[in-house]
Image (cartoon, rainbow, N blue to C red):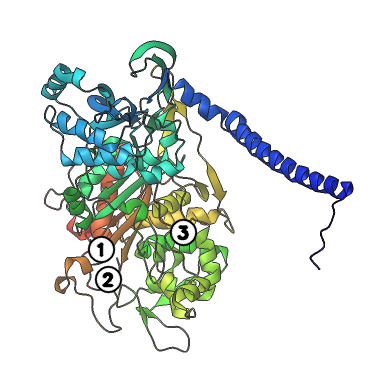
Amino acid sequence: MGERLSIKTERDEQQLFNSRAIVAGLIVLFALGGIMTRLYFLQIKEHAAYTELSKQNYQKHIPRAPTRGQIYDRNGVRLADNHAQYVLEVVWDSVPDQNGDGKKRWNDMQLMLDRLTKIVPLSEKDLRVFGQQVNRRSRYQPTPLKENMTEQEMAMFAVNKSRFPGVNLERRMQRYYPLGTVASHVIGYVGRIDDRDLERLDKSNYAGTSHIGKIGVEAAHEGRLHGQAGYDLAEVDAHGRHQDMIERKEAVGGQDLILGLDINLQLKAEALLKGERGAVVAIDPRNGEVLAMASVPTFDPNLFVDGISSKVYSELRDDPDRPLYNRALQGAYPPGSTVKPMNTLAGLYEKVIWPGKTVYDPGFFQIPGHKHRYRCWKKSGHGGVSMDYAIAQSCDTFFYDMAYRMGVDKFSGYMSLFGFGKKTGVDLTSESDGLMPTPEWKQRRYKQVWYPGDTVNIGIGQGYWLATPIQLAHATASVAMRGKRIRPHVLRAVRTAKNKPEQILEPEVIAQIPARDQRHWEMVVQGMVHVVHASYGTAKRIGVGAPYTIAGKTGTAQVFGIAQNARYDASRLAKRLHDHALFVGFAPADNPQIAVSVIVENGGGGSSTAAPIARRVMDAYLLKKYDDEEPSEEKGEVEPADIVPRVEGAEE
């Protein structure tokens, strides 16, 4: 018997129809949903973008780069300027289709460049830089192809311009540093915008801008110097040719910056360091303005504006004297005895020393229960030493003993109040923290415990302690102001327009360093005055003939350690193994107007090398003596008895 066929009822047919209708309806709804989503994306989400693309069929948005602000010193000397140059620029979208297929490719650009090279010489560097930049920009924005066009090149292009649609000759302002190498580490330089710059820039404000500040004031104050971009909105025909101007928004030029630098003082400081490696920082302690910041050797920032060649950059980078290295901000050195005035204030605050206290110095210090001797720079010792004499004569034993009894925690804590171990916050790039060591730091860094000997060493500014020249100048200025810490700053004022007055910036007071007794400041300052003006001061030579009172402190930092019983003999060592020479000071002592720190790498003694530089910097600023000669014994300006000879193994 065959298979029995089922007979569908009307109800079954209705159910089948309903299910098919639902599936079809869902498919239609899904399709409509997709269409609506796409319409939402096109009409609402991307409305602005497609509207802009539509406008580009008959409008062209041409960015107008603002004129970069200029930089001046405090006396109006121009440090960074702009001068006109003519630049060959290419707008990708306006380059004609060379293949005739209606599609613009890199091949079309390459064919145009090959033809253009026969008219205007284009170097490999020009083409390489252009290729890098054209890929970062909108195809509707101009990209520089060749800068600094000569008159002959401009004439040749002008004659043949009609053959190169999309290529234009434009007048642009180029950065220029009229004083060349002077203050280059402070001013910095501009360079071409790269991929890292684009990641952090407001692209709309930098459309049409090719250069940006890279280091120094140029980078730190980029926002002030750059200004606000403008644009031209032009009507164009089907071929991209301008027909009419629809709208123009003028670019707003950047602000002019007036620095606290006295360029004559800067020139003096750099000249005094000529032939050495070192730094000089001068600050007005009353308001924190940086008067001079010399780092020698230096470099010419003009080399970087158009893109420095790899050969020249390699020479600068590989130079053993490191001319690109800003020693004033980045150089971290053992501060040596220059910090003994600050150490004294710490001892007074923590009550481990007091006015009238004396320490016997046999020429060394020993930790109780240990045989190791920590030597004083004077091998025979100073005998009974008071606080004042310890500063003036830089008696190591006095400060060994004080630091040991104070302990590292209290010592490092009080020194941090002067700003050691952290950036001063000066308005420049790439400042170093230095290092104010602690037991926790040593454990993290070396996985070692802190020893009492470590505390003894930092008591004289040696061991792990590292400070930058600007930190030393800042701390010295704080002593000059009797504990008031004012943040150092390079920018003094801004000017928004040529005929408008300068807007002077207000100084920023960071903190007031505490003292157990306000008279302690005067006692420490008096000790610093005796360093320079007392018959027993380590820097008494520079005080001779000074018409003002100097408060100072010499220092010498060891570059490498020597054995317990060995003698330091500079004549047997390479120059780069000689001690660093340091000096800090301010003047006039009773009315401070300038605070100075000096470091001469491998310069030997602080009193013989660094202190005379500081005196001449102070003379230049306070007496306007910019062309003086160093006092010499032969001229009778210094008595032979006032010259303290360098003692082998001495710290001062």
* Image spot of residue 50 (x, y percent): 51, 28
Q: In this view, does 225 lie to the left or right of 1?
A: left
Label 2 or label 1, whichever comes before in sequence order: 1
Q: Are marks 2 and 1 in contact (CB under 8 Å)?
A: yes
Q: In this view, does 429 lie above or below 88?
A: below
Q: Which of 16 and 183 is in front in this view?
A: 16
The C terminus sits in image quarter: bottom left
Q: Is residue 411 left or right of residue 605?
A: right
Quote the CA–CA distance across marks 3 and 1: 23 Å
- Give the mark toward the camera: 3 or 1: 3
Q: Nearer the viewer, residue 577 or 231?
A: 231
Label 3 or label 2, whichever comes before in sequence order: 3
Mark 2 secondary-structure assignment? loop
Mark 1 secondary-structure assignment? loop
Amino acid under label 1?
Gly
Q: In which quarter of the image is residue 194?
A: top left
* Disc ID at residue 420: 3
Residue at 47% x, 89% y is 369
Q: Is residue 208 above or below residue 423?
A: above
* Image spot of residue 422 (x, y percent): 47, 57
* Disc ID at residue 605: 1
Amino acid under label 2?
Ala
Quote the CA–CA distance across marks 3 and 2: 25 Å
Label 3 or label 1, whichever comes before in sequence order: 3
Quote the CA–CA distance across marks 2 and 1: 8 Å
- Report which residue position mark 2 lands on: 650
Residue at 25% x, 63% y is 605
Q: Is residue 100 visible?
A: yes
The N terminus sits in image quarter: bottom right
Amino acid under label 3?
Phe
